[in-house]
């Protein structure tokens, strides 16, 4: 077990082939300040580097997953100049979403409670989202005069279609975990008491799978959002050719022929 102090802004724990990163500012619903951004980015980079880590779980401490930007950092005195929000987006939020989408292992968001603003869109940037039934997703931005960021304008319409994306973002309507599952925004809503165990079981399952194929799958789905069928066919040919040269493919076929479970070991 890699163990961080209980009061670390991002807690890190290792399981069998997986690593759990827990956002840990529960009094602020794990909203993001600079410290939490820096700690999460470092933890993701370290997980990416550590070849014993084959899946990552991202979750929150307390009753929230994350309430997005810490708005106490945004209060300003009358007459003070407005903040340049592009600075934090460029420095923190955009690199975080790019980091999640380029991890060499699958990432599970285990949404333990409310996920609002960037907190919701960070969850949606993960490969698989499990949510406690009491959790809700809120595109809270319009309430403070902003638009969805952290990829929200890209991700939301792809998850729920433009009509629902506009309504959710314009009205800042909370979406329950069960509705999110029914609408295809997340993989599964699970009983609150089961969330941690379900996330660990899923991470253990992913960790035993051929990581290279899981990462290529993400790349292919992302590419498909902007490409043509013809371009996608070419990409699939090339990706399959590369995967076909891997030890994991050889092991998968051998295990099938020998009627035994495969033991995948490669990591991208
Ligand atoms: O600024 C930039 O860099 C640009 C990037 C922006 C990205 C963004 O994410 S913008 C959107 C920011 N987030 C929000 O607008 C959400 C604000 N929070 C809420 O709307 C509500 O708190 C929730 C709907 C998330 C939850 O409501 P509820 O009733 O369950 O809890 P609560 O009582 O509102 O919050 C509990 C505590 O957490 C409370 O503190 P207190 O009064 O007990 O001391 C509250 O102030 C604090 N908290 C919640 N969200 C934030 C926060 N503190 C700072 N920043 C927050 N975002």
Image (spheres, helix red, strand yellow):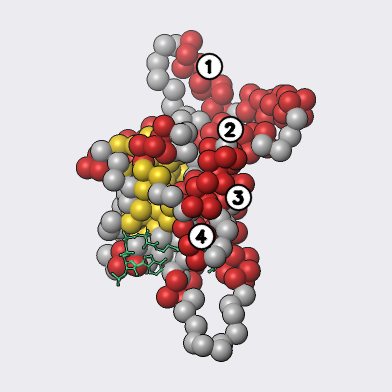
Give the label, 1 or 3, closer to the camera. Answer: 3
Element class at badge 3: helix
Q: Which residue is mark 2?
A: 217
Q: Are marks 1 and 3 in contact (CB under 8 Å)?
A: no
Select label 2 or label 3 by which is in front. Answer: 3
Q: CA distance from mark 1 to mark 3?
A: 41 Å
Q: Which mark is residue 153?
A: 3
Asked if marks 4 and 2 touch (Cβ < 8 Å), the reply is no
Residue occupying image coordinates x 46% and y 30%: 209
Say few, some or many: other residues with alpha carbon within 10 Å of mark 2 (under 14 / 14 to 19 / 20 or more): some
Q: Is residue 206 visible?
A: no
Q: Quadrant of ligand 1?
A: bottom left
Task: Judge whether 89 appears above or below 83 on screen.
Answer: above
Report which residue position mark 4 lands on: 141
Residue 85: image x %, image y %? Answer: 59, 71
Which numbered disc, 4 or 2, marks the residue that appears first in the sequence?
Answer: 4
């Amino acid at each position: 077990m890699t163990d961080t102090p209980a009061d670390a802004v991002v807690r890190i724990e290792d399981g069998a082939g997986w690593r759990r990163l827990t956002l840990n500012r529960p009094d602020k619903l794990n909203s993001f300040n600079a410290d939490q951004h820096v700690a999460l980015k470092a933890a993701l980079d370290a997980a990416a580097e550590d070849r014993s880590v084959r899946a990552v779980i991202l979750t929150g401490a307390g009753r929230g997953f994350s309430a997005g930007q810490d708005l106490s950092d945004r209060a300003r005195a009358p007459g003070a100049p407005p903040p340049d929000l592009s600075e934090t987006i460029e420095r923190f939020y955009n690199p975080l979403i790019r980091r999640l989408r380029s991890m060499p292992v699958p990432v599970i968001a285990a949404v333990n409670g409310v996920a609002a603003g960037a907190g919701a869109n960070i969850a949606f940037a993960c490969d698989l989202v499990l949510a406690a039934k009491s959790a809700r997703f809120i595109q809270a931005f319009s309430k403070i005069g902003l638009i969805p960021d952290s990829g929200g304008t890209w991700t939301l319409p792809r998850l729920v279609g433009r009509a629902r994306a506009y309504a959710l973002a314009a009205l800042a309507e909370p979406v329950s975990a069960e509705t999110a599952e029914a609408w295809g925004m997340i993989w599964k809503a699970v009983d609150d008491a089961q969330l941690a165990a379900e996330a660990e079981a899923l991470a253990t399952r992913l960790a035993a799978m051929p990581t290279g194929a899981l990462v290529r799958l993400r790349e292919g789905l992302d590419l498909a959002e902007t490409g043509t069928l013809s371009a996608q066919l070419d990409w699939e040919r090339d990706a399959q050719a590369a995967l076909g040269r891997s030890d994991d493919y050889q092991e998968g076929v051998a295990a099938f022929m020998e009627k035994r479970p495969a033991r995948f070991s490669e990591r991208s």
